[in-house]
């Protein structure tokens, strides 16, 4: 993979998809339907998916592309592939909370090594550079002119005063029970893959997820966090979370800044 080309295409594609999503988000009304698994889908999910798929297939025609909204792509597998969630945080989108993202990632040998997470309503753009380092771009986020980028680095956590981030829409008692094992200074909540980015920026130390996720939900955030020095492991045995699994379903996991004293499940 040409990482320089990949960086350019993923960044530009995420911005294009974000603009399309915001057109629908800012309209007076939009249709919400239930998919076969009862999760919600909107016109914004489908429009962004079509746009992203067209851009990525044009740029990388020989690469497997897995996207949330194209069920046929879920049956294919490869060691190296692109994986997309065109609108992560659909519930946040529907509730007009703004905490939704465009996620695009490149997986090599089961590891998300490059990714982009764009939160268009928040104006926050996180991605990995060609060299694998993670940055947050600031400024006007011009389509074809990347602006200033701040390098991201995880925190140096204090295990006596941790900052924990948890899901806004999927918080449950099991998650609260696990968080209670830590000495927590502050709790924050966020929607979508922004939780990974809060750990990547050092705004949080720990993000445990004890709930259903799919690889397209997590790959881009995982790549950004890894590029900032963070880690993502399985909840049950603390081994690295890998990708390209049959069906693309994730186990429970923990994303964190190294130095956090992880507690047993």
Image (tube, helix red, strand yellow):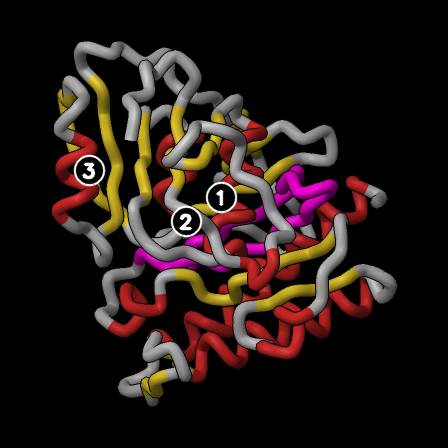
Q: Which quadrant of the figure contains the N terminus?
A: top right
* Horizontal and vertical percent position of residue 149: 56, 33
> Cβ–Cβ below 8 Å for labels 2 and 1?
yes
The residues colored magenta run 99-120
| Above or below 240: residue 48 | below
Residue name at image x 52 percent, y 66 percent:
86
In the picture of the structure, the residue carrying the numbered disc 1 is 221
Q: Secondary structure at mark 1?
A: helix
* Horizontal and vertical percent position of residue 30: 33, 86
Circle 1 Cα neighbour tier, 10 Å, few/some/many (<14 / 14–19 / ≥20): many
In the picture of the structure, the residue carrying the numbered disc 3 is 188
Locate residue 160: give its quadrant.
Answer: top left
In the picture of the structure, the residue carrying the numbered disc 2 is 193
| Above or below 87: residue 104 | above
Residue 127 counted in the magenta span: no
Residue name at image x 47 percent, y 51 percent:
250
Q: Main secondary structure of the magenta part?
A: strand
Residue name at image x 52 percent, y 22 percent:
229
């Amino acid at each position: 993979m040409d990482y320089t080309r990949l960086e350019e295409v993923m960044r530009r594609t995420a911005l294009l998809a974000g603009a399309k999503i915001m057109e629908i988000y800012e309209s007076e009304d939009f249709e919400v339907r239930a998919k076969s698994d009862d999760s919600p889908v909107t016109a914004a999910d489908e429009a962004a998916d079509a746009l992203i798929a067209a851009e990525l297939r044009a740029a990388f025609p020989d690469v497997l592309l897995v996207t949330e909204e194209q069920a046929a792509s879920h049956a294919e597998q490869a060691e190296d592939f692109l994986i997309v969630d065109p609108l992560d945080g659909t519930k946040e989108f529907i509730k007009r909370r703004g905490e939704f993202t465009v996620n695009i990632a490149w997986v090599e040998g089961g590891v998300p090594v490059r990714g982009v997470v764009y939160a268009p309503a928040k104006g926050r753009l996180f991605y990995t550079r060609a060299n694998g380092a993670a940055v947050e771009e600031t400024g006007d986020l011009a389509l074809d002119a990347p602006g200033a980028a701040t390098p991201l680095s995880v925190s140096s956590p204090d295990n006596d005063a941790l900052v924990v981030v948890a899901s806004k829409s999927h918080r449950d008692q099991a998650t609260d029970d696990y968080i209670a094992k830590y000495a927590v200074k502050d709790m924050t909540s966020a929607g979508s893959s922004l939780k990974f980015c809060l750990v990547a920026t050092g705004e949080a130390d720990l993000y445990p997820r004890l709930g259903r996720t799919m690889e397209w939900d997590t790959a881009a955030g995982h790549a950004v966090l890894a590029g900032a020095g963070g880690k993502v492991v399985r909840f049950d045995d603390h081994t690295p979370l890998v990708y390209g699994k049959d069906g693309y379903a994730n186990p429970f996991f923990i994303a964190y800044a190294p130095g956090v004293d992880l507690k047993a499940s």
